[in-house]
Image (cartoon, rainbow, N blue to C red):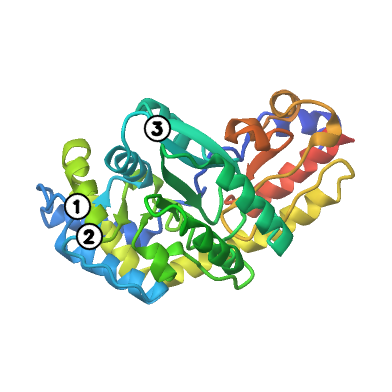
Amino acid sequence: MNNIKPEIQNIISLKKPIYVDRGTPSSNTPEAISRAGIQAINAKKTYYTDIRGTKSLRQIISDSLHNKLGIKYNPEQEIIVTPGAGPGIFILIMALSSLGDSILIPDPCWPGYKSMINALNRKAILYPMLFKTNKNSIDKWNQKLQSLITPKTRLIILNFPHNPTGINLNKQWLLSFADLLEKYPNLIILSDETYHEIIFDNGKYISPVILPELKSRSVLIHTLSKSYAMTGWRIGYVAAPLHLACQIYKTHIAANCHASSISQETAAYALEHGSEIIKKFQQHYQFNRDYLISELNAFKKIKCLSPKGTFYAFPDISEFGVSSNEFVESLAESEKIFVYSGSIYGSMGENHIRINFAVKFNILKELIHRLKRYIG
């Protein structure tokens, strides 16, 4: 029989922190995928590979993109395997822009974009995320974007589904965006599609490359980190039309050499045999999302849009009358709940926090329990 008083139980429960901050699934890499890596080690596949990645993996990637998007990429020259999405983005910025060029990035966005741009002595220009996709909102957004484009603007980074808001790409907006870019033929699109396999409510994976007029100027960035719970394996890839892929390859040789041979073998297995794994993860994340968003919106001082993709909630906490950083620090100190402050994602992230719901369901239940105690 449990004789511990409720107030003491609360203290005990607080001894175990709740980490819903970092952008990683709490699940281990599925055993079948890990086993493919072990088999690669046992088969002595531990040598250098082709700098672009193994031929077999590039063919699998090409087939996968064709199945998902109906678009063909030549595996010999238009696909480059990278040690994750981050290094892929870095070499793209390095290869496709020059010192002093401007690069458009969304606000809010993953902080890594700005860090890389600054490190390479380029200039990051923030454009506001489009939260509504009615014609009036799209027209206003287009006007704003046009006002930010100058002769020095070389690249624009798109990120859908979007980290941290969970917004997914809308075809109506994409068509309008394509019309706008006709005025800027030299502007290249870097499409960060890290979360393209984590889409909810039977939503569709839409990429700018589905429009022929955008495919010729778009580079796709993909990773297996989030979809397959493979963050530590460091494996991703870029796909680009030949004239851009040739430029990227030169930089890739110098910066990355090639991705781990073991990770490449593991990725090949995941892409070929992981469809059921993806479905299970999606179902789990959507169940968690539905619970979390419902509970968050039950608080009078919290408003939270339901994310269409990713595994993040981005609730508005402006009603508390404190900055995002202050809210995050207070929540950690009082309840040992660790979330990210929205301000790290840009000025439009202020008054928000980011919560990773790719965790076990009981963690979310405990999170809500502690939030109720914290908010009162």
Q: CA distance from mark 3 to mark 2?
A: 24 Å
Residue 147 located left or right of residue 104: right
Q: Is any atom of residue 134 visible in this view?
A: no
Amino acid under label 3? Met
Tell me residue 375's x, y (percent). Answer: 85, 35
Query: In the depicted view, which residue is nearer to us: 301 or 336?
Result: 301
Residue visible at 18% across and 56% down in the picture: 40
What residue sits right under mark 1 in the picture?
246
Disc 1 or 3, which lies upstream in sequence?
Answer: 3
Between 222 and 213, the one lying in front of the other is 213
Discs 2, 1 touching: Cβ within 8 Å: yes
Residue neighbourhood size for the residue with mark 1, other residues' Cα within 10 Å, grouped as few (<14), some (14–19), many (≥20): some
| Residue 310: quadrant of the picture | bottom right
Please report the residue visible at 40 percent of the width from the left and 59 percent of the height from the top. 30
Residue at 18 percent of width and 53 percent of height: 52
Instruction: State the CA–CA distance, disc 2 to disc 1.
Output: 6 Å
Q: Which quadrant of the structure image shows residue 89?
A: top left
Ranked by sequence position, the earlier of labels 3 and 2 is: 3
The correct choice, above or below, for 347 with respect to 282 in the image is above
Q: Which residue is mark 3?
A: 116
Task: State the residue position of label 2.
Answer: 242
* Image coords of residue 35 (percent x, y): 29, 59
Taking 309 as reference, is 8 above or below it?
A: above
Determine whether the residue tagged by mark 3 lies in a helix, strand or loop. Answer: helix
Whether residue 28 sits left or right of residue 108 in the image: it is left
SS class, disc 2: helix
